[in-house]
Image (cartoon, rainbow, N blue to C red):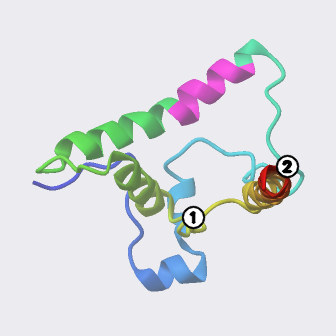
Amino acid sequence: LKRATAQPPCRSPQSRAAGDCRAEHRRSRAPMAEDQGQGAQGPRLLATQADRDAFLRGEVRPLLEGLAVQYYAASPPPEDIVGFLIEAIQRTSCLPPPPEGGLEEDDAEEAQELKEKILELKAQITLLEQKRKTRR
């Protein structure tokens, strides 16, 4: 079975590496914020309900439909659904792989939580040692 895609895959790894892949897809999709010169300033703002509806109809729905087609066309169906969807988006949109591991913010928060937990446990240890000394 040949996989159906919402957008044609990149023609070659060389075009993907050279950044030519985005130009291949611009003809076949609705304009995105970065195509309109807004990508550098941050996320696109959808001010009205009509803007939201147009965004959903023009970009989100075709993307989801293409992902659904790719998923159901795969034989056998992939067990790792999230991994499959990430790879499918990478293939169809010529995106680089996402960063591995946790986010830096998450790591910083987790490190802070661990430090606090260590301090709590050390306090509990000293308290227990003091109780044990007083029992003797």
The secondary element bearing badge 1 is classed as: loop
Chain part drawn in magenta: 51-60
**Mark 2 and mark 1: Cα distance apart in space:** 18 Å
The residue carrying mark 1 is: 98
Q: Nearer the viewer, mark 2 or mark 1?
A: 1
The residue carrying mark 2 is: 42
Q: Is residue 72 above or below residue 100?
A: above
What residue appears at the point 80 percent right and 16 percent down from the top-left corner?
48
Q: Nearer the viewer, residue 64 or 80?
A: 80
Q: Residues within 10 Å of mark 2 (few under 14, many from 20)?
A: few
Residue 50 in the image: x percent, y percent? 72, 15
Q: Is residue 34 magenta?
A: no
Residue 89: name its quadrant: bottom left
Name the amino acid type tagged 2.
Answer: Gly
- Residue 95: tell me if it is visible: yes
Q: Is residue 8 above or below residue 16?
A: above
Q: Quadrant of the N terminus?
A: bottom left
The secondary element bearing badge 2 is classed as: loop
Residue 28 in the image: x percent, y percent? 49, 49
Name the amino acid type tagged 1.
Answer: Pro
In the image, 72: left or right of 6?
A: left
Q: Nearer the viewer, residue 108 or 101?
A: 108
Q: Are marks 2 and 1 in contact (CB under 8 Å)?
A: no
